[in-house]
Image (spheres, coloured by chain):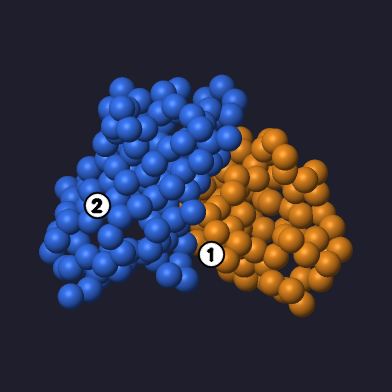
Chain colours: A orange, B blue
Amino acid sequence: DIQMTQSPSSLSASVGDRVTITCRASEDIGTYLNWYQQKPGKAPNVLIYAASTLQRGVPSRFSGSRSGTDFTLTISGLQPEDFATYYCQQSFRIPRTFGQGSKVEIK
Amino acid sequence: QVHLQESGPGLVKPSETLSLTCNVSGGSLSNHYWTWIRQPAGKGLDWIGRIYPSGSTNYNPSLKSRVTISLDMSKNQVSLRLSSVIAADTAVYFCARVTQLAPYYYAMDIWGQGTTVTVSS
């Protein structure tokens, strides 16, 4: 299986901050990487697919990038509704695998 | 507006079979594939498997011998069966639609709210 390793596992930030979450794949997955946001008690919601393409309806303060097997989710100007857990997921090979999650908490 | 709703028993005894249904409303099962994901309390997301409109399936090898995913086109439902359950199968189970958002790129774009299943005697 392809292992997806996220960092940090959690972080504290303030409204307006720029937040960066990293996801590393255990092998080359090209740009077959999705990012999801999950709020407590809710299902995940796709934010970004193909490593850097914003899903329709997702605010432009979210962005994604790739460097080799490292992927980054950036939130530019954190908003109150962005406090949540974020997961990366590879769509390159079966079984699909997720990172362990990065929880963004209020400082 | 496509809506997914999972249903099934909230409590299953060890060694028995977990059976869940995902009712799809506002859209067809065709032109997408469908997947089941689970999430143990306080933990991350685990991919269980997927099914194409043709009925072709792929399963997580860690569960392959115990899991069956099926479609009922007449009822617009996706089903999950997991046999010989153990306590470690206790989780919130989600069904999700998988859509091709760009050529060759797929993501789980619509999810059900999830249903909690506890394995306990």
Look at 61% across and 38% down and name the residue there.
A49
Tell me which amino acid carries mark 1: Gly
Along the viewing direction, whichever of A2 and B64 lies nearer the viewer: B64
Along the viewing direction, whichever of B101 and A67 lies nearer the viewer: B101
Q: Is residue A84 left or right of residue A106?
A: left
Would you place residue B11 above or below residue A61 in this image? Answer: below
Mark pair 1, 2: CA separation: 22 Å
Tell me which amino acid carries mark 2: Ser
Look at 59% across and 25% down and name the residue there.
B102
| Image location (x, y in percent) of residue A50 | 61, 35
Would you place residue B24 above or below residue B47 in this image? Answer: above
Indicate which disc residue B19 carries.
2
Quarter assignment of residue A42: bottom right
Would you place residue B30 above or below residue B98 in this image? Answer: above
Indicate which disc residue A41 carries.
1
Along the viewing direction, whichever of A74 and A47 lies nearer the viewer: A47
Quarter assignment of residue B24: top left
Crowd tier of the residue under label 2, counting other residues whose Cα lies within 10 Å: few below 14, some 14–19, many 20 or above: some
Identify the secondary structure beneath mark 2: strand
Look at 69% across and 51% down and name the residue there.
A73
Q: Is residue A28 visible?
A: no
Q: Is residue B78 left or right of residue B66?
A: right
Indicate which disc residue B63 carries.
none
Would you place residue B63 above or below residue B35 in this image? Answer: below
Crowd tier of the residue under label 1, counting other residues whose Cα lies within 10 Å: few below 14, some 14–19, many 20 or above: few
